[in-house]
Image: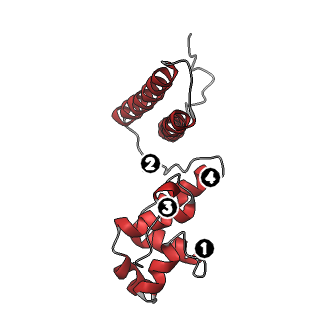
């Protein structure tokens, strides 16, 4: 990677910062070799402070696939006001549903605790809000995953006129 370093103030994630952090988590030299470019060029492309070399969409997709790391996608979704939810593999057991319900509850509890702590002094500042927002986004992500787990649980009932389902 390039000797250029990410400025600490740039940590609120955007796709460019996420790409930089992805390069830090994975072997950028190995990624460069697989992409057919020099490590210095990739390092410059991953550096959000670099003015001349920019990571293309195709390269972002390629490094996402090579690393199986969704950091860029997650940051882009968040920047666009959404969330990236990796859909679970098809499941059909009650334990998976129960586990997902617990994950939703844990994330919601964490978000509510963050709100309570932030309000303790009567004012929610910008830094506290960013922490609350991150916790709420995690809650939303787990709730969307819950919808998918529940959808896999759906079964068609037999449609016979003699079958009566009581309340």
Q: Where is 32 relative to 139, above or below? A: below
> How far apart, in angstroms, are the residues tagged by discs 3 and 4?
11 Å
> How far apart, in angstroms, are the residues tagged by discs 2 and 1?
25 Å
Q: Where is 122 relative to 7, above or below? A: above
Q: SS class of the residue under badge 2?
A: loop
Does the residue at mark 1 contact the one at mark 4 (Cβ under 8 Å)? no
75, 94: nearer the viewer = 75
Does the residue at mark 3 contact the one at mark 1 (Cβ under 8 Å)? no
Q: SS class of the residue under badge 3?
A: helix
Dot 4 alpha-carbon crowd within 10 angstroms: few under 14, some 14 to 19, many 20 or more: some
Asked whether residue 74 appears in the rendered view, the answer is yes
Report the residue marked by disc 4. Answer: 79
Q: Position of residue 92 (x, y in %)?
A: 40, 40
Residue 57 is marked as 1
Badge nearest the viewer, 4 or 2:
4
Q: Residue at x 62, y 52 (%)?
A: 79
Q: Residue at x 47, y 68 (%)?
A: 64
Residue 88 is marked as 2
Give the position of the C terminus as an image quadrant: top right
Q: Residue furthest top?
A: 167
Q: Earlier in the sequence, mark 2 or mark 3?
A: 3
Q: Earlier in the sequence, mark 3 or mark 4?
A: 3
Does the residue at mark 3 contact the one at mark 4 (Cβ under 8 Å)? no
> How far apart, in angstroms, are the residues tagged by discs 2 and 3?
23 Å
Does the residue at mark 2 contact the one at mark 3 (Cβ under 8 Å)? no
Does the residue at mark 2 contact the one at mark 1 (Cβ under 8 Å)? no
Badge nearest the viewer, 1 or 4:
4
Residue 18 is marked as 3
Q: Position of residue 76 (x, y in %)?
A: 59, 57
Q: SS class of the residue under badge 1?
A: helix
């Amino acid at each position: 990677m390039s000797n250029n370093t990410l400025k600490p103030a740039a940590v609120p994630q955007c796709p460019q910062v996420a790409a930089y952090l992805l390069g830090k988590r994975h072997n950028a030299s190995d990624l460069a070799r697989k992409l057919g470019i020099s490590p210095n060029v990739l390092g410059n492309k991953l550096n959000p402070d670099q003015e001349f070399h920019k990571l293309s969409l195709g390269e972002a997709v390629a490094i996402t696939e090579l690393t199986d790391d969704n950091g860029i996608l997650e940051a882009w979704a968040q920047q666009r006001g959404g969330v990236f939810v990796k859909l679970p593999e098809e499941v059909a057991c009650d334990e998976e549903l129960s586990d997902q319900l617990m994950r939703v509850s844990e994330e919601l509890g964490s978000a509510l605790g963050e709100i309570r702590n932030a309000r303790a002094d009567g004012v929610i500042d910008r830094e506290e809000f960013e922490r609350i927002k991150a916790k709420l986004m995690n809650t939303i992500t787990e709730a969307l995953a819950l919808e998918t787990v529940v959808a896999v649980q759906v079964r068609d009932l037999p449609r016979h006129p003699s079958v009566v389902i009581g309340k």
